[in-house]
Each structure stands twice: as C-alpha cells, then as structure tokens.
Image (cartoon, helix red, strand yellow):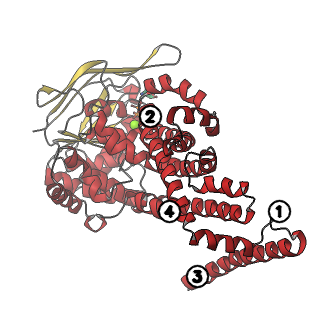
Amino acid sequence: MNIIRDTAHRIREHWLGALALVLALVVWECYASLVVRNSFLLPGPTDVFSAFISLLEKGILLADFEVSLLHFAIGLSGALLIGIPIGIAMGWNSRADQFLNPVIEILRPIPPLAWIPFAIIWFGFTPVSAGFVIFVGAVFPILINTYTGFRGVPRIFVEAGRMLGCTRTRDQIRYIAFPAALPSVVSGIRIATGVGWMCLVAAELFGVSNNGLGKDLWFYYNLHQMDAVVVYMLLLGLIGLAIDMVFRYYIDRHFLKWRTGEVA
Amino acid sequence: MGRLEIVNLSQSFPRDDGSRLQVLENLNLVVQDKEFVCILGSSGCGKTTLLRLIAGLDTAESGAILLDGEEMKGTNAKVGMVFQEYSLFPWRTVLDNVAFGLEMQGAGREERYRIAEQYLELVGLTQFAKSYPSELSGGMRQRVAVARALALDPVVLLMDEPFGALDAQTRNMLQHELLGIWEKTKKTIVFITHSVDEAVFLADRIIVLTPRPGKVCETISLELPRPRDRTSVEFAKFRRYVLDLINQPESHSSKV
Ligand SMILES: Nc1ncnc2c1ncn2[C@@H]1O[C@H](COP(=O)(O)OP(=O)(O)OP(=O)(O)O)[C@@H](O)[C@H]1O
Ligand SMILES: [Mg+2]
C-alpha cells in the first residue's frame, strides 16, 4: 500500500518536473520566434536542435567530448594524486598540519583561472596545460575534505584497532583512518569534480587544442553561431550533471553502503 | 595462564593551571588466573584510567603491570578490551569486525572467517554476520565487541562498563551470556561497572576504589554459588554490604 502510494507520489513529482521542462521549451521557443525574432540574440530550441544534429553528424561533438574528458581526467587524477596524500599527512600528523597549513591557506584562495599564464609557460599549449587549470580547481576541495575526514576519525576506532594488533602507523591509516574518513574524502571528490568541470571552459579558452567542449564554445561564438554555442552550454551542463549523478547513485551507494543505516 | 599483577601504579594528568591531577596513587592489585573481578568506584575515581593502563593504551607515570610475572609495555595480543562506547568499525560488516584482529595478525581469509564465525556463534549472532553495525541494536553491538575481543583468544579480557548504555533487561541478559562465555572460555576478566547489582551478580571478587586519587579501598570475595539468583537473601545481603561500603568510603580504612 505504502509502496504504491510512494510510486504514485514519485510519478507525480517527476511529471511536474517534466512538465516544467516542456513549458520552459515552449516559452523559450515562443519568445525566440515571436518576440526576439533574431537567432543571433536568442536562438530558439529548434535552431539549437538542428545545430546539435549537424554538429553531431560532422563528428565534431564526439571529438570535443573526448578531448574535454582527457583534460578533465588529467586535472582530476592530478588532484587526487596530490590532494589525498597531503590531506592524509596533514590530517593525521599535526606537525605536518602546522608545517603545510600556511602555504595551503595562501594558495587556496587564488582563483584557478589566475594560474592560466603559468599553465601556458610551464606546460605550453598541451592538454596538460588545460589539465593543470582544472587541477588547481579540484585539488583543494579534495585536500581539505581528506584533511577534515582524517582529523575527525574518532579516537575510539584507533584505540580499538590498537587493542587488536593494528599498531603500525601505516596500518592504522589504511585499515582505520582511511575507511573512517572515506565519506568525507568522497564528498570532497564530488565537490572537486564540480569545480573542475566549471574550470573546463576557461582552461580550453586559450587554445591548448583543436577540440574540446569549451574550446568549440568559443570557436562558434567567434563565428557568431549562437545556436551552436547553446548546444555546448547545454552539453557542458548535462555532462556535469551526469558526473554528479554517478556520484550520487553509484559511488555513494557502493562505497558507503555502511552509512545508509546510520541516517535512518 | 592469565595472572595479572599491578604494582604501585600511579598516574596523573596535567591540569590547566599547571598543577597535576593525581588520578591513581600507588595502586596494588592482583587478579588471579581465570578470576572474574569487578571494579567499583565513584565517577572520576580513575577506573577507566586504570583499565587503559592495563590495556597498554597509556603509559603509567610509575609502577608496573605484570602478566604472569612479565612486565607489559604497550598493547598486547594477550589482553583484549571491550570499550564503554560503541567501538565497532561501522564500515565493516559484523563478520569483518570480528575478523579484524586476525586479519592484522596476517591470518588468511578462510581461516579468519572460520574463527570469526565461531565467536559470532558464541555470542549468538551468526545470522547477522553480513550486517553492518548500524543495523544492530546496542546490546547486539556490545556482543559483537565481545566476540571481536575474544577472537584473538586473549588471556585477559578488560571491560569498561560495557553494558552501561543498555536498558536493564538487555543488561541482565548480556550479564548471563557473559558468564556463560566466561565459563566456556575461562578468561581472566576485569570488569568495570557502576552497578552494584551487576558486580554482585558477576564477580568472584569486587574491588572498590577510593575517590581520587584512586587506590584499592576494599576487596570483597563473593562466596555465592553460581548461577546466582538476584532475588535470593544472600544476594541481597552482599548487595547491601557493598552499597554501604560505597556510600561511606571514609569509614573504611583502605586495606588490600
Ligand atoms: N587524558 C586525560 N587527560 C586529563 N585528564 C584526564 C585524562 N583521562 C582522565 N582524566 C581525568 O582523570 C580522572 C579520572 O578519569 P577516569 O576516566 O579514569 O574516571 P572513571 O573512574 O572511569 O570515571 P567514570 O566512572 O565516570 O567513567 C577524571 O577526573 C578525568 O577528568
Ligand atoms: Mg570510565
């Protein structure tokens, strides 16, 4: 009975959302074709859709997607490789915390885009260069959340571990602190993917590659093909959403199974 | 064997004003092999401090703790502990919690699960092997904690108010079970409690500590046959006796 009511409720909820989307499309189309009547100032959904089809047919979108994913992967793996170990060191060892904290606090507020000049000087016009900008955006959320996660490991777990023969620092980190901190680390990674994705357009702006979602967004702007620009905007948004969904529905559920009971 | 000898144990902690808070002072105590000892004392008298020192989680300011004549330094696989708070690893299933110590000792997967399952059976939670601690009730969690400590087959089991957070009914049930386990496994048990009733029900001997600085105030041997009946006259007599002792600790000179 409850389940049926639940499903009915859920359908109604989604219906409303879907209705809003359709309405938005209709309003947009009407406004574009009846009021603005200028597909440069405001391309309508139909313009955007045909631009999408033609870009897809030319194979440009797939190439853009691959290149952007490469940039994103470089940035994110760099952020994981650097952010997690430093976060662990600072969270576990208060000496390391005192030592590294000032440097981190000074570097952290610098906007990722302010690093673009050095990205170019250090890495040239390569994918690594774009990856570096994304890295700067992604590394701090990962580092900070790893740090907080390790700080917050309840002492009782470490002591229970010691009573059971988990006495080496390496084992305590691996078997106790890391799993205890994992929820925080994962949420840091999730924030980092969001921030990193935001940095993508700017990271591709200065021409590190011939393709890329951000790169071609600017390219079509320069050609004044605003319908294509909208295609890229929507794609960037949808892919960002998809990445977040992966976290919400896959990673949270599979890695943090043990937490489900705690909230309830 | 599991004969525990505590010699002239003292511990103090620094206070904010720079002086030191003397928590234990020249505490002497012997716990015989396979003996079930309950430690009673007012809140803050140093019971947890004492237990943590025996466990090797902290280092004493002075004095020594000997297990079968050998001085112990640091934690030791021969000494197991059940904490007052829930200490199960929430990210591990019940079975993996119980198997943790064996995993640390390098036991293979098959071996450690086989042993862990034995101990889960001992505490009656076989069907919860795959559950996570968050899915268990408080009493079940403490049962798992007991199984986890026993899985390494220690000779001494330390318990710091393990049932303190449970309701009276669950508490009585777990006391029964613990006695059953103790009879089967024959460990030396040092059990801290606030409850006189619990102490009289469980212990071979009750040690009453003085308020800070803690030392042994009184030792009571309970020559009550087991299983004990909480409603019997003898039980009530002992309970009355211990309660009186605790309520006027000053009137008793400390004797060991
Ligand atoms: N690590 C510590 N640093 C400073 N003071 C401490 C520390 N551990 C314990 N104390 C102090 O030592 C005293 C004894 O503490 P302990 O936890 O041993 O008491 P207890 O007998 O277990 O009390 P309870 O029955 O309430 O659990 C308390 O006053 C406590 O504040
Ligand atoms: Mg205590």
Q: Which residue is mark 1?
A: A41
- The residue mark sitting in front, 2 or 3, is 2
Q: Does residue B37 appear to the left or right of A65 in the view shown?
A: left
Query: Going from the N terminus, do you reach mark 4 or mark 2 first?
Result: 2
* Label 1: which secondary element: loop
State if disc 2 and disc 1 touch (CB < 8 Å).
Answer: no
Chain bearing mark 1: A
* Chain letter behind tag 3: A
Count the labels in the image: 4
| Residues packed near mark 1 inside 10 Å, few (<14), some (14 to 19) or many (20 plus) | few
Residue located beneath label 2 in the image: A86
Q: Are marks 2 and 3 in contact (CB under 8 Å)?
A: no
Q: CA distance from mark 2 to mark 3?
A: 45 Å
Residue in view at x 59 percent, y 49 percent: A200
In this figure, which residue is indicated by the disc labeled 4?
Answer: A246
Residue A58 or residue B10, whichever sits in front? A58
| Residue denoted by label 3 | A7
The answer to whether tags 1 and 2 share a subunit is yes
The structure residue drawn at horizontal position 64% and vertical position 70%, both measured from the top left corner, is A52
